[in-house]
Amino acid sequence: MEGIGYAWTALTTTPAAFAAMAGVVWGILGGALPGISPSIAMALLLPFTYTMEPVTAIVLLAAVYVGAEYGGSIPAILIRTPGTNAAAATAIDGYEMKKQGLAGEALGISLVSGVIGGLIGWFFLVVLTKPLASVALLFTPPAYFALGVLGLSVIASLSSGSLIKGLMAGTFGLMIATVGTDPLSGVNRFTYGSSDLLAGIPFILVMVGVFAVSELLEQASKRDWARATAEEAQTRIKLPNWAMMKRLRKPQAIGSAIGLFEGCMPGAGGSIAAFMSYNEARRWSKNPEEFGKGSPEAVAAPESANNTVAGTALVPMLSFGIPGSNSTAILLGGLLIHGLRPGPLLFEQNPDFVYGLFGGLLVANLSLFFIGMLILSPAIWLVNRPKPYLMAVIYALIFSGIYSIHHSLFDLYIVLLAGGVGYMMRLLGFPFLPMVLGLVLGYLIESNYRRSLLLTNGDHSVFINDPVSLVLLIVAAIFVIGSAWRDYKTTRQQRMAGPKT
Amino acid sequence: MKRDFWIGLVTLGFATLYWFEAAKIRISPLDGPVGASGLPKVLAMTLGVLSILLIIRTLLARLNTKPPTENAEAAAPLAEKLRPHLRAIGMLALGLAYLLLIPTFGYALSIMSLLVAVSLYIGADLNRRTVAVAVVGAIFFHLLFVEFLDIPLPKGRLVDTLLVFNN
């Protein structure tokens, strides 16, 4: 009951409710643009959240995530180009429905399934977060250090590309985090006399650079930009009737169940959940032969899944401070900017924030239904804009937004440099997320490492003697060894198969 | 595979350099058992080990695999392979040019130039539409950041000089 009171206060006394709706609008529009992932849409807004109240800022960012997961289905259905990775499964049957003149129906199924999935994800977020966060009360400094190492190891081992490169990326992120004044001893590290570097390299600059700027560089490197040809005024959303809703119950349930599980797993996410739910929905469908030819169930299942993930992905992030995806890494960044540290203390010290966030997310998921119907035409208009102008505006927005944080041109140079690094990482097969995580978790890992050794006068066995730390380090080792074994088996199979003809 | 070998060498070199730089970090009386240089040294060693593993893995893969038959992509001339990356570098250069323009020309003119330059670079034609997008975009950003969000964006030395002359 107390939580409901906090949520009500947050929604009625702060702009959180408005932020939820604005975030959904921005998320749908951003998600509808191919190349703008939910994390990029969130990263573009991150600089603007600096001066907001914490609950308004995080609700805004989380609502963008909610909106973008639906927004990606608009171009997926209309022009067979998913706006987000998670909408790739929707494009398979969604576009087939559009070819049969059922674009409005497909969009309606996508919207309703997304809202249902989002509400289910929200429910489990509210139910699971506090109990899991309470487990973290058992954590000592060695355990927090081990948790940071586990987070990095899991993400590195589950990221695309090789395990070694994932671990290298995580190490780079930690290296970037060491730049600046050491918070424990006050010594300057890697500043080379620059006063701009004394405060370190804010992770927001690296996030915006590697996610947003590198994407622009990637888009600029291509020449095959096809103009979107989505119809404009003719397309209207048609909501499914009761008979159709009955038919869609099973695929929506399958999608939500898979989304619940995948969302809580670090390194998984919307796209994996979407494809898994597509496959499972086909397996359990009474009409599996329709899949691939315009089956409504094939649209409902992945859309339920990816919107469920948008809620449940926040569970490990809020409980332990370990983000499992690019989007939750941005959210964690937003929390840290406002001086909020995830974990059980967040519930103890800032219950108004936590329940305000829950309330804001409920508003976001509910308003997705109405906003999704109203914003279709503007979203289609935006998808049809010439790409040169879109890219120019996004580039300008990035620079202007970043400058608004510290009013420093130096920050813009860092963002450009990070963009160049991000482009190189794409080229050389290094995953982003471990590097971003290393940067975000760098302080947690180092401060707890040094604090642990301070308590034991430099005795490293503290990390083995602490039972929670030991378990977490063993799990980290299992993930790394398991991933190495998987890489080795894959390489061996490829070698035995011989070169492809 | 060859590429990973060179990546491993470069990162090994970087790890070595990082180690030497970490060793220069001052020791403070406030340091505990592990000082400010502790984690950086651990990271340098970690990166060094990972680099060596990458190099070893690459060498082992080369020993155990037949050389691939030349495919169309590998046979493409170097200029064609580099072209996409040069386009990306060009985009980066436009951003850099914008940063160099701001102190002199100020935010409004610089952002207008950026909008025009990027639009043309990505493939728009130089016509009234492109100019209109740049002008409207610059006005929109000025209103949003300067008027609405009250961000003191740089006016530029040119504008300051003109103001001095006027006064």
Image: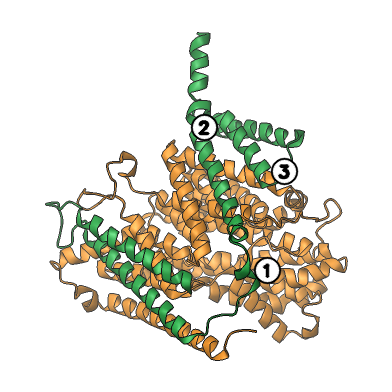
- What is the distance, in whole Å, between disc 3 and disc 1 at their CAs? 29 Å
User: Is the same chain shared between marks 2 and 3?
Assistant: yes
Looking at the rendered structure, the kind of residue marked 2 is Leu
| Residue B43, image x, y percentages | 29, 64
**Residue A88: mark:** 1
Asked which colour scheme the image uses, the reply is by chain
Dot 2: element: helix
Is B167 placed left or right of B18 in the picture? right
User: Is the same chain shared between marks 2 and 1?
Assistant: no
- Name the one closer to the observer, B89 or A156: B89
Letter of the chain that mark 1 sits on in the rendering? A
| Residue A460, image x, y percentages | 19, 72
| Residue A103, image x, y percentages | 82, 63
Letter of the chain that mark 2 sits on in the rendering? B
The residue beneath circle 3 is: B124
Mark 2 or 1: the one toward you: 2
Is A310 placed left or right of A200 in the picture? right
The residue beneath circle 2 is: B101
